[in-house]
Amino acid sequence: MEKDSAKQRAISILSEEIVKNRLVVFIGAGCSVSDGLPSWKELVHDLLKQYNIKTKETDPLRLATRLERDVGKLRLCESIAERLQTKPDTESLLHNSIELEC
């Protein structure tokens, strides 16, 4: 019973935030991967290959830090933006919905 009450409270709070236009939904990369965009790990490894950076490090966050240090923040951001501007292989209801809001 207490669990249902907590759910109802959460729904109520979220509903209020939607009405006030103060709700932002963050969606993980998984929703884009199925549409042909890279996962975070794939993106980092593709960029390492692009810039011919060889390392034994495996942690994606540390690898991204290394990329930023070696390539420069602006150049790295441009490369990421270019890679993510690739049109997905398929139409996605989720992406179309997000596009409508932007």
Image (cartoon, rainbow, N blue to C red):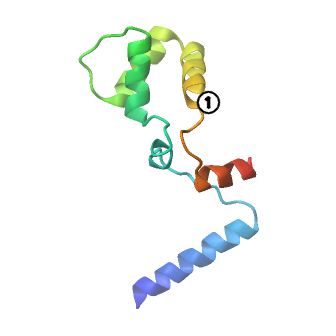
Q: Of 90 and 76, which appears nearest the observer?
A: 90
User: Taking 31 as reference, is 3 above or below it?
Assistant: below
In the image, is residue 61 above or below residue 17? above
Badge 1 crowding class, 10 Å Cα cut-off, few under 14, some 14 to 19, many 20 or more, is few
Q: Residue at x 62, y 73 (%)?
A: 13
**Residue at 48% across, 86% down:** 5
Residue 91: where, in percent of width, then height?
59, 48
Can you name the residue that lies furthest to the front here? 90
User: Quarter-wise, where is residue 94 in the image?
Assistant: bottom right
Residue for badge 1 = 85
Secondary structure under tag 1 reads: loop
Residue 23 lies in what quarter of the image? bottom right
Residue at left offset 62%, top offset 70%: 14
Q: How many marks?
A: 1
* Quadrant of residue 22 within the rendered picture: bottom right
Where is residue 3? Give x, y as percent. Answer: 41, 83
- Residue ranking furthest to the bottom: 1
Whole-percent x and y of residue 75?
57, 13
Would residue 35 appear left or right of 17 to someone viewing this image? Answer: left
What amino acid type should be assigned to the residue bearing mark 1?
Gln
Asked if residue 91 is positioned above or below residue 65 in the image, the reply reads below
Vertical placement of residue 16 versus 1, above or below: above
Tell me what residue is drawn at x 52 percent, y 51 percent. Answer: 27
55 sits to left or right of 16: left
